Amino acid sequence: MLEIKGLEVKLEEEDKQILKGVDLTIEPGTVHAIMGPNGSGKSTLSYVLSGKDGYEVTGGSATLDGEDLLDMDPEERAALGLFLAFQYPVEIPGVGNMTFLRTAVNAQRKARGEEELSAADFLKEVREKAKSLKIDAEMLKRPVNVGFSGGEKKRNEILQMAMLEPKMCILDETDSGLDVDAMKLVADGVNALRSEGRSFLVITHYQRLLDHIKPDIVHIMANGRIIKSGGPELALEVENNGYADILSEVA
Amino acid sequence: MALAQLKIDTTAARLADVDVPQGAASWGNAARADALARVRQMGLPTKRDEYWKYTDPASLTAADAPEAAVFKSDETPLFDAVDRVKIVFVDGVFDADASDDLQAEGLEIERLSDAMATDIHWAKDIYGVLEARGQKPVERPLATLNTALATDGVVIRVTGKAVKPVNFIYLHNDPSSDAILHNVVKVEAGAEMTLLETGPAAARFSKLLEVDVADGGKFNHVRAQGRDHERRAVTHCFARIGAESTFKSFTLTFNGVLTRNECVLEIVGDDAVAHVAGVCVGDGKDFHHDDTVFITHDALNGESRQVFKKVLRNGATGVFQGKILVKEGAQKTDGYQISQSLLLDDDSQFLAKPELEIYADDVACSHGSTSGAIDETALFYLRSRGVPHDEARNLLTLSFLAEALAEIEDEALADDLRDRLEGWLARHR
Ligand SMILES: Nc1ncnc2c1ncn2[C@@H]1O[C@H](COP(=O)(O)OP(=O)(O)OP(=O)(O)O)[C@@H](O)[C@H]1O
Ligand SMILES: [Mg+2]
């Protein structure tokens, strides 16, 4: 599904190398987790994959189902099935959450040559999905993320993911700022979407989320590289001992 | 040359070959003569006037109007779906055949020339009178020139709750037309009306509207100035707003090489509401749009709002001069003013002069003015969800305009204007 080879990325504005050769292959239907110290490049990887400005790819490649992601506009990547749940979801005053969702769903359908969702079908689907994430109707009417609490913003990201039904979902610290119950809701939302054709890349600092969303493979990222990969037990090791052992092990 | 001399010369040149309209009763003649004397005394504005610092009035004061190509569009005319009384002017001349009968429930409508030919007429107390009141503390000689020279227009007395809106439709057919129209509206106590205005009117258009809203009256105004690119316009609205009455005005402007819209509102009765709002969108160096607003609070518990939003691209210029004056004793005034521009590139510019002058101690007034680019973070967020770049940009642009569009009371009208803005944005990508 997602194949990243030797990806090197620097900031466009300054001479700062952030990703220094990332290799990562995600098979369809699998859940991968990335952990790693602050500033190691996890969010940068997710931004570069989704096409944010400000980064320059200096080497390597990234493909989704064989198609070169790095050459595409962000909207093309989305239409191809890539989704990023932002570490810091963006507030958009003046654009209603419903309008936003419907515009996004229909834009992707249009890009894929599918028919637009009727207003009634759309409404029905949003209501159902919002309900299971405990997002109330009033929140759907408000402008995108404006005045939402941290946890509400994260749940709203998962709602967007549920509506867009992407095949490659990247979740950047979706657990941060969530209370215990909300974390369960979000995990249930993610688990409900798990399927053979859909993969997840879950970026997190904590084992707790991974208790709910069981990863197949856990990667440790440090200083712009994936330095170690293993099974779910790797996350437990980090939880118990921090990164010091792993870092010195590979040094 | 000294500014005073320059203004005298400008005025003399403008008036050299002008015929003052004839055929009025004595009050009409007197109003025109008085205005002519006043304009001679004030002198027409030049770029060196403080009040015209951001907008060069030269083409508005020149003896001859610069030509303007007639813009043809196959778009459905605005307000076509509205059940209204149509009053059509072609290049500034009333067209009886194209207009509806000048009658409707709750309204007395007459052509200005008929009203002026009548010895005793209610319009006498408003025509040129509200304009003259609005000359202090800032002179507006182009308005006075309009009072002196207006050749056509309509006067409306609102006697009850008007069922249908009145729609002034200003068609532009002649590339060298120079139109001067003067309209008067008197809203009697407790009466209500909606006035719609559409169209560019002429190559050069001077338009003045005087509105007297008596106690408990309601005047609702929505206007769109057409889509012609080369036309020029200077418009004035002078309103006197009585106790517990409401005045609301919204203007949408597409294109236009030069537009100066002045709105001068005076709240004279307690508990009155005055809102004035506008959206303009301009593309290119030849777009210059100026909103100049002056709201005076001279009564208790008045509420005023000024909400102006501009979308500027490819070197377009937007101007906002807005003032809230709260007179001594106008306690509990609630005044709000916001003027913002969305600059879609580095070449466009927004020049703003927001002012507050307050002589009462128990008031709440706020004003803000900003200009900025599209929020790149929001743009990326939308695109990452699959919304194409241009569509995302337009969505953010419309959201930027939302606060101004929300000032339009009638939601169907607001939706229509929003759709047309969307169309403009789609054409100017
Ligand atoms: N636009 C930018 N401008 C300047 N520095 C940047 C920018 N983007 C990323 N960086 C830097 O690149 C490094 C990696 O940042 P990134 O956000 O990818 O880390 P992260 O692994 O997601 O960290 P965290 O766990 O704290 O979220 C950091 O040192 C960060 O300061
Ligand atoms: Mg991060």
Image (spheres, rainbow, N blue to C red):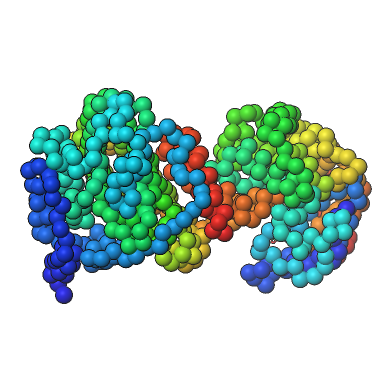
Q: How many marks?
A: 0
Would residue B424 be found to the left or right of residue B53 on screen?
right
- State the residue in front, B233 or A191: B233
Would residue B397 be found to the left or right of residue B278 on screen?
right
- State the residue in front, B86 or A108: B86
Query: Where does residue B297 sit, x and y in percent of width and height?
Result: 23, 39
Query: Where does residue B134 sit, x and y in percent of width and height?
Result: 19, 47
Residue plotted at (69% across, 65% down): A55
Residue plotted at (35% across, 59% down): B174
The answer to whether any part of residue B270 appears in the image is no
Residue plotted at (10% across, 34% down): B120
The answer to whether any part of residue A65 appears in the image is yes
Residue plotted at (57% across, 59% down): B429
Q: Quadrant of residue A24?
A: bottom right
Query: Where does residue B88 sit, x and y in percent of width and height?
Result: 34, 44
Quarter of the picture containing the C terminus of chain A is: bottom right
Q: Quadrant of residue B247?
A: top left
Which residue is situated farthest in the front direction here? B97
Query: Where does residue B17 sit, x and y in percent of width and height?
Result: 16, 64
Would residue B76 be found to the left or right of residue A185 on screen?
left
- State the residue in front, B341 or B63: B63
- State the residue in front, B18 or A187: B18
